Image: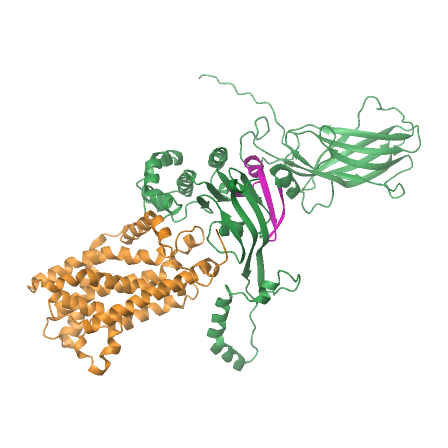
Amino acid sequence: MSKNNIAVNVEDLSKIYRLGLKEQTSEHFAEMLWSFVRSPVKNFRKYRSLYTFDDVDLAGDTAAGEQSDSILWALKGVSFSVKQGEVVGIIGGNGAGKSTLLKILSRITPPTRGSISIHGRVSSLLEVGTGFHPELTGRENVFLNGTILGMRRKEVTRKFDEIVAFSDVEKFLDTPVKRYSSGMRVRLAFAVAAHLEPEILIVDEVLAVGDAAFQQKCMNKMQDVGQEGRTVLFVSHNMPAVTSLCDRVIWLDHGQKVTEGPAQEIVGKYLLEGVDTTAHRVWKDSSSAPAGEFARLREVRVVKKGGDVTGHYCIQEPVGIEMEYEVLKGGEVMLPHFRIRNDNGILVFVTLDHDPEWYQRPRPAGRYISTVWIPGNLLNEGPHFVECNLITRHPEAPQFHEVDVVSFAITGNMEPGTARGDWPGRLKGIVSPALEWETQYRKE
Amino acid sequence: MIKPPGKWEVIDFQELKDYRDLFFFLVWRDIKVLYAQTIMGFAWAILNPLIQIIIFSIIFGKVAKLDTDGIPYVLFSTVAIIPWAYMSEAMTKSSQSLVSDQSMLGKIYFPRLIFPVTPVLAKLVDFAISLFLLLAVMLYYRISPTWNLLLLPFLVVLMMSVPAGIGFWLSALSIRFRDVKFAMPFAIRMLIYSAPILYSASSIPDGYRFLYSLNPVVAVIEGFRACLLGTEIPWEFILPGAVVSVILLVSGAIYFRKMERVFVDVI
């Protein structure tokens, strides 16, 4: 990575905010009167403290657990760099520091510590329609909003027709924006934003507005921007959008960088966060392994085609689930099976071992590996949990039964051939199979 | 390069120049929007001072019979009220500029100084229109222009620098302390009596003249009067007022720049 092609370099970035503290209440009338008289001084200190921080506040950084109650580290020692032409997603839960990071990158608020160096012209889009004035007409707002977003007047004039065509509101161009429907307003606003030509684009969750068709249009536009070789930093909660747009993802949590890496992998990890299972479970010690009279479970794995153990799958990838077990006493007919649940705890399906070689056939003692392949384009996006079972048939007796023994995450994307195709949002439902459709046209 | 705020920031004129198109559209927006959905439109720019002049002329001219150094009261008050109306409105708008555009403040970056300067420029349109009223009154009283009129451009610049300087200070203060909004109407009322708008500066006792002249509004009003009516130019008011307004402007800009990076955090 040579120094020249780095577009954004963030070093040890921290930002602290002051939180409100519960006010003291007075118990006597005299106290109340005194606190009323003193309140201007107190208020002055309070508002001043919003942006002044002393060494004690800042020290919270090093001595963990000793920081003042009124301090919030919105970002804490975040470093990363983005190469030119890279599309980078920033993900994380609420309060992870994503928006603060974007605000610092777009120079709206300064960092408390650390620095950022940026090479190239930046446009930031933290909101669509910033500065739209309800009294101005659509035409006027295009110019105002365009210059607010950093375009020159000439640039707006040059792209004006394109912007209007993109927005579909030609008819209302000379109507004050206050009479627009909210959808029209958003379309016009996004149309302006979509025609920005910065070297570095910073985008916050703007795809969350408008109807599905419009979101589709936005996604396509974003994809174009990425393909034109611009650098894009993109914050979103829409994981499919992140995986299909971004090359790389940075995951923030509570102001700190958890990890960064290829989009698919990090999004998968993020979706599985807080889930206390893995893609691979081994019982090394045979005495503690789940076992019945006839069989003992030794290992459960989630594997890709080719045998790599991983918990992250694209929606079109087949998922293999393997159980490795020992048959302790030979001569029984056995039925290994899995149950797959989604993150709402809903049972998606049960699958039984029907391998013709062993179906209804007593098994000799020894070690077995039974694998089931869940085809791609079947399970819906999100985390899935595996329950691993084995019973004997005659009579039916459970041998082992492990709930949530392994888990894996399916991430969606907008590749052709998936159930979504180029539809931008997640499809509802327990499964998301890619089905064949046929439409016939009949003349009246 | 983005870094934590330092103690002092200098004004980045290159950056201001880069944003001139935005500046133009914001001023233009303020002008466009001001009289939106009114029947009278820009006629309000004449009606407002006209009504004030009528009221003041009746109360202070006819009823109280204030001494105006022999100038008819309508003429006397018109030449003062028109620049005053501009200054008071520009001042109010400018000090509220950050608070009223705070949604933009938190979502996009451009040089923050544009906020308080915009109303100072936008209000000039009203001022220009109200000059027609001034012209009409001067024609009615058959006042012929003198060489003093050459001073007008300088006085207009001085007239603009007063609300700009005060706007820098108060907008930066009011984003932190909303008290400014409540104190503003009262401060404006104080200012109208602290300057020779309704009465003549010659009624100020000699001993207090210098103190009085430190008020830059006095310089603007007395300057306008002399410039338009052709009376002797009161340099003893104009010079101290101009110095004070330059101090206000520079110190205001410095304070604003010092505070601007934390604006968003304290909204």
Give left or right: position of B40 versus A430.
left
Q: What residue do we see at 39% from left, 36% from top?
A: A167
**Closer to us: A93 or B239:** B239
| A262 relative position to B66: left or right | right
| Residue A249 in picture, x, y percent from top left | 59, 41
Colour basis: by chain
Q: Relative to the observer, which residue lies in front, A81 or A32?
A: A81
Task: Name the spot of residue A82 as percent of width and height, x first.
Answer: 54, 42
Number of labelled discs? 0
Give the colour in which the image draws chain B: orange
Q: Quadrant of the C terminus of chain B?
A: bottom left
Taking the spot 26% from the left edge, 64% from the top edge, the residue there is: B87
Q: Is residue A254 magenta?
A: yes
Residue occupying the far top of the picture: A443
Q: Is residue A9 above or below residue B69?
A: above
Asked whether residue A374 is in view, the answer is: yes
Left or right placement of residue A351 versus residue A204 in this view: right
Q: Is residue A99 visible?
A: no
Where, by quadrant of the figure, is residue B88 drawn?
A: bottom left
Residue A340, horizontal then vertical, whole percent: 72, 36
**Residue nearer the viewer, A162 or A182:** A162
Q: Colour of chain A?
A: green
State the extent of the magenta-drawn residues as a range.
A233-260
Residue at point 41% right, 52% down? Answer: B104
Q: Which quadrant of the view contains residue A394?
A: top right
